[in-house]
Amino acid sequence: MSSRLFQFVVVVVAAFSLSCVRKNSTIPKEQIAALTEERAPAVIAIAAADGDRYTLCSGALVARNLVLTARHCVSKALTSNPSCDAAGRSHNGAHVDKDLDPQDISIYEGPRVRPGLDAPLARGIRTLHPQGATLCDADVAYLVLDRPIYHLPVLPLRSHAPVTEGDVVVPIGFGGGTANAVGTRVPRKTSQVLATGPGANARTGAVLGPREFEVESATCRGDSGGPAIDARSGEIVGVVSRGASCSALGNHVYTRVDAFQKLTALAFLQADRQMREAVAHRER
């Protein structure tokens, strides 16, 4: 190898190494703590009623009367274990049936919630989600509420760019953390994005569709639909779709929110329309 070529290779490798260091550089703990404290109140619990029984999920308030969550939290489940390939196709048929009645879905706030005992903040009035009956590569939904929520912060969505491997996110949900105390809102430790789809992670077993990504830290029952928040920008980049056990590292799959821009635009349009119709009704 000539000395000039060798110098070029060294420069390229050095530049690549520097970019990787910047990508995975440590984010100050106080910055993450401040972001978590600011964002956590906007992460709310979603409880779907079936008689006296409730199924608990998580979601994020993204407009005064609009919640972002997972599709499997607003539709009737046909299986609890979706099997997907890297093209976003199902290997075990349909995963969900018809939608739940939005009026049977209630919204709760606070660090600890008790569906059925606590008074809900609001109820659903309409659900919006991708078409089809599988959750592979499409486990995202919006819930339009019957009333606005003004006292909680609203979380921004990242719509301009996807997450990339090495990004650092903060998952927040009502899975109760390592204790798996479902109903307790717990921000997990910062979690690195291990892989993005399409593809498979041979080390963890995660299979990712084109609109999915994998994080390292465990998410638990009750965290479904909860947001992954970019630790630098504070934007929501994905929602919990499926994963391994609560204690496992890796194989925790999120659906990217930036991949559903048309759905997001329609959801915000419907939420705004609902607000204007409610105002017009009160003024009659």
Image: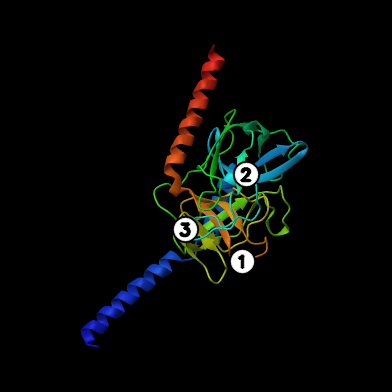
What residue appears at the point 30 percent right and 80 percent down from the top-left corner?
10
Of mark 2 and mark 3, the one earlier in the sequence is 2
Q: Is residue 29 above or below residue 20?
A: above
Q: Which of 81 and 118 is in front in this view?
A: 81
What residue appears at the point 57 percent right and 67 percent down from the top-left corner?
205
Marker disc for residue 249: 1
What residue appears at the point 56 percent right and 45 percent down from the top-left corner?
133
The CA distance from mark 2 to mark 3 is 23 Å
- Disc 2 on helix, strand or loop? helix
Q: Badge 3 is on which residue?
A: 87
Return the x and y of residue 24 as percentages of the image width and height: 46, 66
Kind of residue at disc 1: Leu
- Locate residue 224 relative to residue 129 in the image: left or right: right
For residue 127, say whether it is visible. Answer: yes
For residue 114, say whether it is visible. Answer: no
Q: Which of 180 and 188 is in front in this view?
A: 180
- Disc 3 on helix, strand or loop? loop
Return the x and y of residue 114 as percentages of the image width and height: 74, 41
